[in-house]
């Protein structure tokens, strides 16, 4: 009977903490914004901005110093491509740079005076490409268009000078080894399909940590002491029910928000979504649990509620790079890879992208799956230790000042 009575007391305390946390969450505008408004609206805005995936008709200025038939052919072929539009002609490179500096053009094609002469002498012709590197997509469109046109013109010139007699011989001469270019895991070769899946996983972690941090900051501000646990309340006498009660409140919210972020949004904007909901649930369950306990630890480490916003917003971009999605994992220094292992988003993003974008099975992401469960268990233990320490500090201050900590 003693064991059942103890279990009943624990369950009663857990439910009370859950109930109070739900009420506090409903009354805090900041928590509502980060728990509901941001996860609902921000992914839609971000996905809508990058939904076109690619840029087309990028304005380019041409400096044609050759004024030859081959240079005009190069310009016509570039202008005929879907990604580049020849918008201006300049007399020299300085005038072209002026147009780029005024953002009237995004790049420059410079054709030297000896362009056709060198080609007719069986020498290599050169076309210089200058790009505005502030925008990756425009740089890609300008450079790749010039590259593809130069390759096509080179093929035509080789075919003409080969002295062949049949069309079949010309085809073989132009392309001795036929191939088909099939982009894997990103059919549109777009920025959104490549990056946004990892961004959605990161948004889940960041909004969760921000919401938990604001909730803890509000509780700390309302308390006369600097700690967030009302030690004189009867249902706040045990550490584990407090941690699990708060966890259930946050998990209740992010079971819905996680479904919206990781299942609904990719389908709304037609991003790659190859995984079944069962596979995603298998991996994302430990990820959400680890994020909740991680957020509870962070909330106890900051003194003011505004600090958690500054910290998490500051680390958002580094965390995205450290996932290995937007930057090759092999190029990340070992020290920073070790730092990235502290955050659930690192392994959550890798697992989600492999499942949903690359068509992997849960067995293929078994390493990430195990690490996420290890993080969930470790952060649960650390959260209990941190909250227990908060008990100690609150009781010490209560004894010192002889006041109520409610």
Image (cartoon, rainbow, N blue to C red):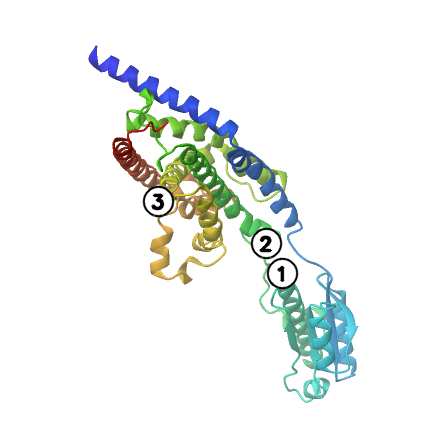
Left or right, residue 314 beside residue 98: left
Report which residue position mark 2 lands on. 191
Q: Position of residue 233 (x, y in %)?
A: 33, 22
Other residues around mark 2 within 10 Å, as few (<14) / some (14–19) / many (≥20):
some
Residues at circles 1 and 2 in contact by the CB criterion of under 8 Å? yes
Residue 78: name its quadrant. Answer: bottom right
Q: Secondary structure at mark 2?
A: helix
**Viewer-nearest residue: 109 or 46:** 46
Residue at x 43% of width, y 39% of height? 213
Q: Position of residue 136 (x, y in %)?
A: 60, 62
Residue at x 35% of width, y 54% of height? 339
Q: Which mark is residue 137?
A: 1
Count up the numbered dots. 3
| Camera-nearest label, 3 or 2 | 2
Residues at circles 3 and 2 in contact by the CB criterion of under 8 Å? no
Q: What is the distance, in whole Å, between disc 1 and disc 2 at their CAs? A: 8 Å
Other residues around mark 3 within 10 Å, as few (<14) / some (14–19) / many (≥20):
few
**Viewer-nearest residue: 7 or 321:** 7
Q: Secondary structure at mark 1?
A: helix
Compare marks 3 and 2 and give the one earlier in the sequence. 2
3 up-or-down from 241: above or below: above
Residue at x 46% of width, y 25% of height? 22
**Viewer-nearest residue: 267 or 254:** 254
**Viewer-nearest residue: 382 or 301:** 301
Left or right, residue 228 beside residue 79: left
347 up-or-down from 251: above or below: below
Compare marks 3 and 1 and give the one earlier in the sequence. 1
Q: Position of residue 251 (x, y in %)?
A: 44, 30
Residue 123: name its quadrant. Answer: bottom right
352 up-or-down from 62: above or below: above
């Amino acid at each position: 009977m003693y064991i059942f009575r103890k279990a009943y007391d624990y369950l009663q305390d857990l439910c009370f903490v859950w109930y109070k946390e739900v009420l506090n969450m409903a009354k805090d505008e900041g928590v509502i914004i980060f728990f509901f408004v941001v996860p609902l609206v921000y992914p839609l805005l971000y996905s809508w901005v990058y939904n076109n995936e690619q840029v087309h008709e990028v304005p380019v200025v041409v400096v044609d110093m050759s004024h030859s038939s081959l240079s005009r052919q190069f310009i016509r072929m570039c202008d005929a491509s879907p990604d580049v539009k020849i918008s201006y002609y300049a007399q020299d490179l300085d005038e072209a740079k002026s147009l780029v500096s005024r953002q009237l053009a995004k790049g420059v094609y410079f054709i030297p005076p000896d362009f056709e002469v060198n080609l007719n002498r069986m020498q290599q012709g050169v076309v210089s490409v200058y790009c505005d590197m502030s925008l990756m997509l425009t740089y890609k469109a300008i450079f790749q268009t010039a590259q593809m046109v130069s390759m096509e013109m080179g093929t035509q010139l080789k075919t003409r000078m080969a002295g062949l007699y049949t069309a079949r011989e010309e085809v073989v001469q132009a392309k001795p080894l036929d191939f088909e270019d099939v982009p894997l895991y990103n059919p549109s070769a777009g920025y959104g399909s490549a990056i946004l899946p990892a961004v959605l996983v990161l948004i889940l972690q960041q909004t969760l940590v921000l919401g938990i941090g604001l909730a803890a900051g509000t509780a700390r501000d309302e308390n006369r002491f600097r700690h967030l646990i009302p030690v004189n309340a009867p249902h706040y006498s045990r550490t584990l029910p407090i941690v699990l009660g708060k966890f259930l409140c946050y998990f209740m919210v992010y079971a819905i928000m996680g479904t919206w972020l990781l299942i609904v949004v990719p389908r709304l904007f037609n991003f790659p979504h190859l995984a079944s909901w069962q596979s995603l649930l298998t991996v994302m369950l430990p990820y959400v649990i680890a994020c909740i306990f991680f957020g509870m630890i962070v909330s106890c480490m900051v003194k003011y509620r505004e600090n958690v916003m500054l910290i998490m917003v500051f680390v958002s971009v580094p965390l995205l790079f450290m996932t290995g999605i937007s930057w090759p994992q092999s190029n990340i220094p070992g020290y920073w890879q070790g730092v990235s292992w502290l955050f659930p988003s690192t392994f959550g993003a890798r697992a989600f992208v492999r499942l949903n974008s690359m068509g992997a099975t849960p067995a293929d992401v078994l390493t990430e799956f195990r690490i996420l469960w290890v993080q969930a268990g470790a952060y649960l233990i650390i959260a209990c230790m941190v909250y227990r320490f908060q008990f100690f500090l609150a009781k010490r201050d209560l004894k010192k000042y002889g006041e109520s900590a409610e």
